[in-house]
Image: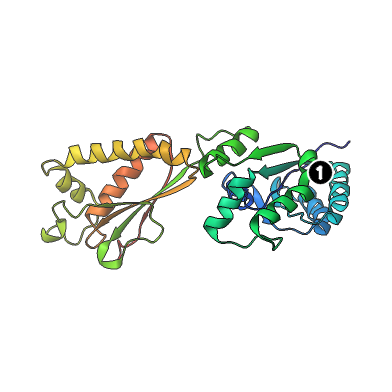
Amino acid sequence: MPQAKGRIFIITGMSGAGKSQALKSFEDLGFYCVDNLPIALIPSFAAMVQSRRYLKNVALGIDIREGRFFKDFVRTLDNLGKLGLEYRVVFLDASDAVLMQRFSETRHRHPLGKNIAAAVKEERRILCELKARANKVIDTSKLTLGELKETLSGMLELKRTAEMKLSVISFGYKYGIPLDADIVMDVRFLPNPYYVPSLRARTGLDAPIGRYLRSKPGFRSFMKGYTEQIKALLPLYVKEGKSYLTIAIGCTGGRHRSVYIAGELAKKLAAGGFSVSEYHRDIRK
């Protein structure tokens, strides 16, 4: 067999078992993901993976709900092996009770279009051979989204240490809170350099603003405590499967206090080994 030139994970399984969440986890782990790719298109897509160096890791979401498609799918898998592509079939499952509960909670219609209990039973019958063919079966009955991602990450033998990327944004409340913020800190309690004539035209990127804020009582203890609080929270976000976190720091206009605090926080987090980007949204307004 030729040496493998790419890696394909085929994600399938019971409806409601978490295929969409699994694909999102693969995407967060750096995979190129395609959902609901028709079986007939898998060979041509695989050939593209083989020919393009930047498509090394791919995850495909595949639904097989009719028995007549199973033989086509098996034949397709055999052809992938002949192409020299490494592939693994990951089958997501959950107990009937959990699947029925999930459909009831989301009020989604089961793809087979029957009452939920009958549909789950029928789908399990249809997919039993596919489950037996899978390289990995994951029972998601008791898994949180973070635990599912951890399971997939462990299966891929990937390290999570550098997985989370942080974005620290400064903003002005008068222009609105960033819609993508996960954590928001209001620093309007700090003295406002805007009311110091010699500092009004400056921004938080200028040294005089930093000196002014650092000279105020309680500032250093606040900065230390807030940084430690953020550092303590990050492992909890990682555990829940978060791969990108946006921390927004706000003051009135977004030019002085928030800019300086955001810059200092970004530097301290970067020094702690995190991947950090810094953006001052309203500094020029």
Which residue is label 1 attached to? 129
Q: Determine whether 20 is above or below 239 in the image.
A: below
Graded by Cα atoms within 10 Å as few (under 14), some (14 to 19) or many (20 or more), the crowding at tag 1 reads few
66 sits to left or right of 211: right
Q: Judge by depth and name the residue closer to the eye, 205 or 246.
A: 246
What residue do we see at 33% from left, 40% from top?
230
Image quadrant holding the C terminus, namely bottom left
Q: Quadrant of residue 200?
A: bottom left
What residue do we see at 56% from left, 47% from top? 28
Q: Looking at numbered disc 1 in the image, what kind of residue is underneath it?
A: Glu
Q: Position of residue 151 (x, y in %)?
A: 59, 36
Can you say which quadrant of the picture contains the N terminus? top right
Determine the image quadrant of residue 188: bottom left
Q: Quadrant of residue 275?
A: top left
Q: Could you tell me which secondary element the residue under label 1 belongs to?
A: helix
Colour option used: rainbow
Number of labels in the image equals 1
- Judged left or right of residue 226, residue 108 is right
Image location (x, y in percent) of residue 107 = 55, 61
**Between 213 and 151, which is closer to the camera in this rendering?**
151
Residue 54 seen in the figure: no
Position of residue 180 measured from the top left corner of the image (x, y, whole percent): 41, 58
- Who is closer to the viewer here, 124 or 44? 124
The image position of residue 206, as x and y in percent, is 24, 52
Examine the rendered structure and indicate whether residue 281 appears above or below residue 81.
Answer: below
Observer able to see residue 198: yes
Q: What residue lies at 19% left-to-right and 62% top-to-bottom?
A: 201
